[in-house]
Amino acid sequence: MKNLSTSMDTLWYISYFICVACLLSKLYASTDGINSSQFLRDGETLVSSGGSFELGFFSPGSSKERYLGIWYKNIPVRTVVWVANRGTPISDNSSSLKINSTGSVVLSNENSSVVWSTSSTRASQDLLLQLLDSGNLVLRDNKDGNADFYLWQSFDSPSDTLLPGMKLGWDLRISLNRRLSSWKSSDDPSPGQLSVGIELDPYPQAVTLKGTKKYFREGPWNGMRFSGAPQLRTNPMFAFKFVSNQDEVYYMYELLNKSVISRLVLNETTSTRERYVWVEAEHSWKLYASLPRDYCDTYGLCGANGICIISQSPVCQCLKGFKPKLAQSWNAMDWSHGCIRDEPLDCTEKHDFIKFSSLKLPDTMHSWVNKGMNLRECRDACLKNCSCTAYTNLNISGHGSGCALWFGDLVDVRRFIDGGQDLYIRVRASKRANRSPVIIALIVAPIASICGVLLVIYYIFRRKMKAKGNNEEDDSRNVASSSRNVAFEEDLDLPLLDLATVSRATDNFSINKKLGEGGFGPVYKGVLADGQSIAVKRLSKSSGQGQNEFKNEVKLIAKLQHRNLVKLLGCCIDGNEKILIYEYMPKGSLDSILFDQTKGSALDWSKWFNIICGIARGLVYLHQDSRLRIIHRDLKASNILLDNELNPKISDFGLARTFGGDQSEDNTRRIVGTYGYMAPEYAVYGLFSVKSDVFSFGVLLLEIVSGKKNREFVHPQNHHNLIGYAWRLWTEGRPLDLIDRMVDDMLVEPEIIRCIHVGLLCIQQNPDDRPTMSTVVLMLNGESMLPQPKQPGFLMDLVPSETCSWSSKNESFSVNDISITAMEAR
């Protein structure tokens, strides 16, 4: 009997504990939500059904205060995207979250005092507070058949972060304004000075405030993007949306690639709005874009009727037809007073409009809009109202539609390198008419200049033809004159070495010292008496260069000083011997690493990106920053040398051409260079310009990304070369398939997509469509959205002509020709 009693007692206790456990399970949180009878305590969390986000209590940074927030579940670096009690922290771990009897979500402390709550909605016994996989915390009535109807949601009260699917802007039906506001610091999530939202009147535009003052303005939505954010375009990663109707006005973005993790956050410290992408391979957030981008994004920097142009110095100018209001202050770079008209408009006179392109539209604070007008009707409406200052299309998609008129001063206008919008500004008709003589002069002057240039070319051609037969004799005579060489050396400010010194340095041009051979002759490694390593380029006798031409090339290269150009240390002229002495590049040429799978895989993406940017900077110097425009004409992987730190240096100027300050292009009957890198207009018609080098750079960029040679790559199905293959992948929305397998794990998706994008822009068929190299540098290192590329040239290889030859290693190289003018570079 005693044993039976003991057994019954044990069974009773077990049953009791089971009942308590069941009761507790009802009281405490389930996996992704809590109902009206449950609560969430500090130390417990809710996890969204897909495991993307987690809700719980946390202490930010070094703070000991407790906050209720949402963060990414599977990212090791805790990244909080929403905070409930931003301004009312809890000092201990005794708080709890629950749904009260009135249907509000309530956060209480140990004294049951309400720390934070939602507004009362409806009383129900079947309410559910649930964390969705989008990061949205929602309150819904389970009895309501509409699963997408929420009584309350955290997306309606954002903190500092905009997630995919979140709306930034207004719900006009309930006067709800969704704005982002920065954290005060990494230790304090309470609202800081920086905030961003949509201003409604008189026409919606995105504005960032610092305190109560406008800090940065993205401008009105033009049907495709905000006019002040030309980079805001649909791309392989993001799609952007703007809705404006009688019920709602909001902006949002969606991820096209669901595997991407991205967020947009306000940074109080840097006063920027930053978009980040999570890079799993690096276990870190990668900055993808940042606004404001530059000085010109500062609100109203140039004052009323001023325009900011970041590529000019100073950046602020008055719009055409305007002058500084206070000239002395303006010249002292105080632009706050802005500009006024050169002459006040007289409403009794005739007026016209000047078209300005690539602009951020002015602040819509003093504007009027009509969505039903076309551009012509818009112009007429502005012309009829003497107070109207400017007009443009409201919507630029398709053929354009709608009308926006500005009255009074035009504030916060800037010009973009790419993108932007047209704006028509009112001027006196006489101002417009006065442009006719200017236009005539602009037409006549270039024609006269071209005629003059043609006469000079003809004169030089006649002289060269006359002197050609005596070229070698003249060379010998020049070499024999030691005084000439001394003068040459002094003019160069560069050592002129004797042949014996160079011969000793290279062990009498030993085959063991030979580094390689190009179209102009072999290159040797040498060591001078002082121990300095050098690269010796010995021009072959069949190179086609006379002594004067050689000296001109040396003068040109000697005066080029840039960290991304190979440095010329000296030269040697002795009889028929013409030798260039360069700094020695221990890592050799780019192609020796790029197309070697073992060596290439040893470099991480940051090294490759540094090489890309370095080459681009070197070309900017050649095209723009040196006194003369210099067209390289043979840019390729083998002509890029690498120093010990793998910094790239452009070399081999044997085919370079120099342009005068006003010259933009030239042509030649003898096509020289390397097929696979030549621009279409050069390979077919002999036309070359700075855009020819841009094309070559684009090919080289795609080679660096893919690890494949354009000339050797042939797609097995469609016979496309590398250019054609890259274009096809881009049009199919698969640009990342171009990435070489040996560096696949090292690349960051946004950056590599951007590089491919820039490469395709550089190799467009029409040279006018290609960006300049200075623009390329900005594209590579900036965050602005890029224009969509047009079809490139040479989707399939041309058959090389007789002017292109190959070495025994089947590597194409430049033919032995040189065309350097006698003009000096800086």
Image (cartoon, grey):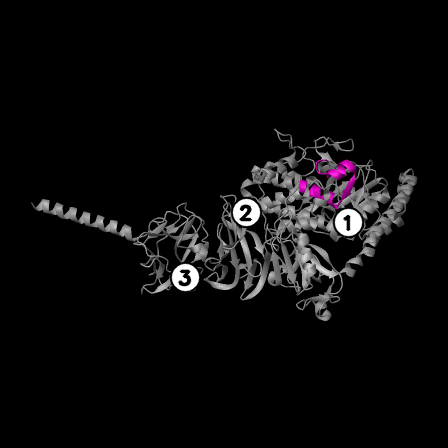
Please name the amino acid that badge 2 sits on.
Ala
Where is 489 relative to 188, above or below?
above
Please identify the quarter of the rendering in which residue 465 is found: top right
**Residue 405 spot, x, y in % from top left:** 64, 59
Q: CA distance from mark 2 to mark 3?
A: 32 Å
Q: Which residue does the image show at 41% across and 64% down from the upper left?
A: 88
- Of pointers 2 and 3, the one earlier in the residue sequence: 3
Of tags 2 and 1, the one toward the viewer is 2
Q: Is residue 196 left or right of residue 95?
A: right
Q: Residues within 10 Å of mark 2 (few under 14, many from 20)?
A: some
Kindly report the secondary structure that dominates the magenta region of the rendered protein. helix
Q: Is residue 106 visible?
A: yes
Residue pointed to by mark 1: 629
Can see residue 644?
no
Eye-nearest disc, 2 or 3: 2
Which range is magenta? 675-699
Q: Is residue 696 magenta?
A: yes
Residue at position x 10%, y 44% in the image: 4
Q: Are marks 2 and 1 in contact (CB under 8 Å)?
A: no
The secondary element bearing badge 1 is classed as: strand
Secondary element under disc 2, as helix, strand or loop, is: strand
> Depth check: 579 or 809 in front?
809
N-term-proximal mark, 1 vs 3: 3
Q: Residue furthest left?
A: 1
Left or right: where 471 falls relative to 101 = right
Marks 2 and 3 in Cβ contact (< 8 Å): no
List the residue tagged with mark 3: 85
> What's the residue type where badge 1 is placed?
Arg
Q: Report the disc number at residue 239.
A: 2
